[in-house]
Image: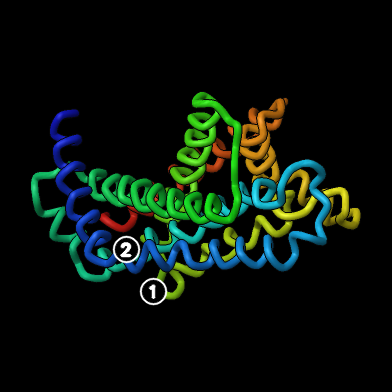
Amino acid sequence: MTAHFFSDTAALTGRTLRHVTRSMDTIITTVITPVAMMLMFVYVFGGAIDTGSVPYVVYMLPGILLMTIASGISYTAYRLFTDVKSGIFERFQSMPIARSGVLWAHVITSLVANLIALVLVVGVAVLMGFRSGAGVSAWLAVAGILLLFTLALTWLAVIPGLSASSVEGAGAFAYPLIFLPFVSSAFVPTGTMPGPVRWFAEHQPVTSIVDTIRALFTGHPVGDDIWTALAWCVGILVVAYGFAMTAYRRKIA
């Protein structure tokens, strides 16, 4: 049964990956907004923001990476919505394949597409002067956190992908996620914010994730931020997965 699940998921993942590789414009579109924001913040606002000894491009890159992921998962919801509306789900249900393999194919495709987008954004950041003395273990930790965050948001994207009534609705849920880094420590220190905004910024998930990645990039101690970041990622993943599977069972019932 397990081998059946893995072989079916691999075949279905190949199908969704082909859709992505045949329309690379989706990945390019995913990258455009974060890169434009990075250019604007570094070259327009960067000189007015005091980040101490840390170059501003290093300071704000973690937030840009999270924006890239949030932008990318909107296409996951779109691709899933398209499959649902085209009737492909019903056709798959009539075939002797693992039912959950359909969802996992979209999830794995999201991870691959977002990985490509993240590499492109980091490449642009390097051209803009980003440098990091982080060792291999620190880079692996960054990759692990970004992968976990992508997985959590991808399962979140599955919910509107299955339940939205329009293609616009399927992708629109990602907009608040894209702008959430603006009310965090991603671009400016939270100490500069007024009381209520500062409280929200310091207690929402993006800040702990950003602070952890930034510390890993700069070689500073991560402290308790890493545990808070992991707790947020795992918590979002568990809740999103539960709601996504509930929506899926209702859809195929």
Quarter of the image that includes the C terminus: bottom left
Q: Mark 2 to mark 1: distance in Å?
A: 9 Å
- The numbered dot on residue 79 is 2
Name the residue nearer the viewer: 234 or 50: 50
For residue 193, side relative to residue 201 (left or right): right
- Amino acid under label 2? Arg
Mark 1, Cα crowd under 10 Å, few <14 / some 14-19 / many 20+, is: some
Residue displayed at 83% across by 56% down: 197
N-terminal of the pair, mark 2 or mark 1, is 2
Residue displayed at 50% across by 56% down: 124
Residue occupied by mark 1: 167
Image location of residue 240, percent across then percent down = 48, 46
For residue 184, side relative to residue 14 (left or right): right
Determine which quarter of the picture holds residue 92.
bottom left
Q: Name the outermost residue toward the right.
A: 195
Residue displayed at 58% across by 32% down: 230
For residue 35, side relative to residue 186 (left or right): left
Name the residue nearer the viewer: 125 or 174: 125
Residue 192 visible from this viewpoint = yes
As drawn, 120 above or below 41: above
- Amino acid under label 1? Val
- The numbered dot on residue 14 is none
Residue displayed at 69% across by 39% down: 211
Q: Dot 2: what SS? A: helix
As drawn, 77 above or below 151: below
Mark 2, Cα crowd under 10 Å, few <14 / some 14-19 / many 20+, is: many
For residue 248, side relative to residue 40 (left or right): left
Residue 231 visible from this viewpoint = no
Q: Dot 1: what SS? A: helix
Determine which quarter of the picture holds residue 82.
bottom left
Image location of residue 154, percent across then percent down = 43, 50
